[in-house]
Image (cartoon, rainbow, N blue to C red):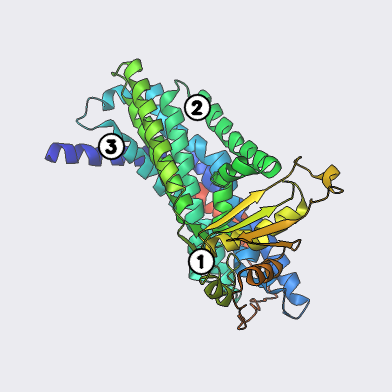
Amino acid sequence: MPSRSAAWRALAVKELRELLVSRAWWILLILTGPLIGVSFISAVRVYGEASGVGGTSAGVGEAFSPLTGIWAPTFSAYEIVAVFLLPFVAIRLIAGDRQSGALKMELQRPLPAATRVLAKVAALAAGWIVASLPGLAAIVLWNAYGGSSNAAEIAAVLAGHALNAALTIALAAAAGSVTQNPSTAAILTLAVTIGSWVLNFAGDIHGGAWEYAAGLTPPAMVAQFQHGLIQLSVVLVAVVLATAGCALAAIWMRLGVATARRVWESGAVALAAAALIAVAVTVRASWDVSEDRKNSLPEPDEAALAQLQGPLEIEAHLAAEDPRRTDLERQALSKLRRALPELRVRYVAATSIGLFEQTAEHYGEIWYTWKSRRALSRATSAEGVLETIYGLTGIPPSVEREDTFRGHPLAASPRFAAAAFYLAWPALTMVAGLAVFRRLS
């Protein structure tokens, strides 16, 4: 046991050293500061200009939500980091040992392959935490300007990008272990990333199963967190995929095992992951941590809908690319699904764009069915949908209304931000990098 523990410590130190001498990681750090800076400075300026117009009347509160106006655009820079920079760091750490021959020497140590992958993932996670410092600096600057910060909203945004980074690391680990060349692994990782974009595009066009699958991709997952919505099903799917990627990396890291056996084991991991995902997507628990409850219906309406007994069916005759369908989904149905677990929604359309269906007799109709009753409406707003449901089911509509979210306007300018992100961060990073290379080389 002591020898195994000593071997683990030696491996962990070795992986951290490999990360510290990785030029790719230092380049990632240098570029992260300016990327965050561009996003943060632009967000603060737009937020300040909107606040300077004056007034926070009903209907514009969302414009003065720091989650929407500051944190979502600022931390969106980490999507670029995760997609275009982090994979090269992870692939170098995973596949570099095979290229240099160090992996063959490591395999002589009494440690399972999963432990080796865990050590590499832990080092990459530490590297991501360091890369998160510019984002934390943006939070400090915003507070220094007198801006409002909600801890739950910031935590949700950080958690979303952390999960996205975990998926990228797992994908790069799997690609780096399966392939024989880092360049091939990089191409494979990029292909999967582009595939997720294509899936999102197909979901927007075709809807249905494509739209549902697109909701589980990293871009859609990050978008949910950036809006303050945490869905347990999405988190579980991300955890399963990340674990499966690490498992594949561990399987293919065992160079002495026959290829056929590794292929069969990889297939078993894929089947197990598919089964777990099928279970995870059925979990309906979710939390809206946004201060203005942008992902939820008003609490009085949710309490009124809780009285509804039996499933509610909605049949919308709207094409996938019809703007009315987008409004219906975003403003009403996405919130209604969280309040009504037995809600069933079906879209009916002959085409994807609906351009030549406008003259059809029933196009644009939205039918509501509850028990033996039916009601017709064409409203796509949350208020119109609730009014139709209340009239159909006979549930007394909510009289009490929540106070309108007035937001947190702040006519601030991004003082010291340019110097911090464009000069101080790159300079400090380069000085630290030179010091580390001089010490470890």
Q: In this view, does 132 lie above or below 396?
A: above
Q: Name the residue under label 2.
A: 185
First in sequence, mark 3 or 1: give its number. 3
The residue that label 1 is drawn on is 309
Q: Is any part of residue 415 visible from this angle?
A: no
Q: Cβ–Cβ below 8 Å for labels 3 and 2?
A: no
Residue at coordinates 38% horizontally, 23% vertically from top-left?
Answer: 98
Residue beneath disc 3: 115
User: Looking at the image, which residue is at 18% across and 41% down?
Assistant: 5
Check disc 3: other Cα within 10 Å, few if <14, some if 14-19, many if 20+: some
- Identify residue type, mark 2: Ala
Q: Is any atom of residue 411 visible in this view? A: yes
Residue 366 image offset from top left, x and y in percent: 72, 57
Distance from disc 3 to disc 1, alpha carbons, whole Å, reads 51 Å
Q: Residue 152 carries which label?
A: none
Residue nearer the viewer, 341 or 405: 341
CA distance separating discs 1 and 2: 53 Å
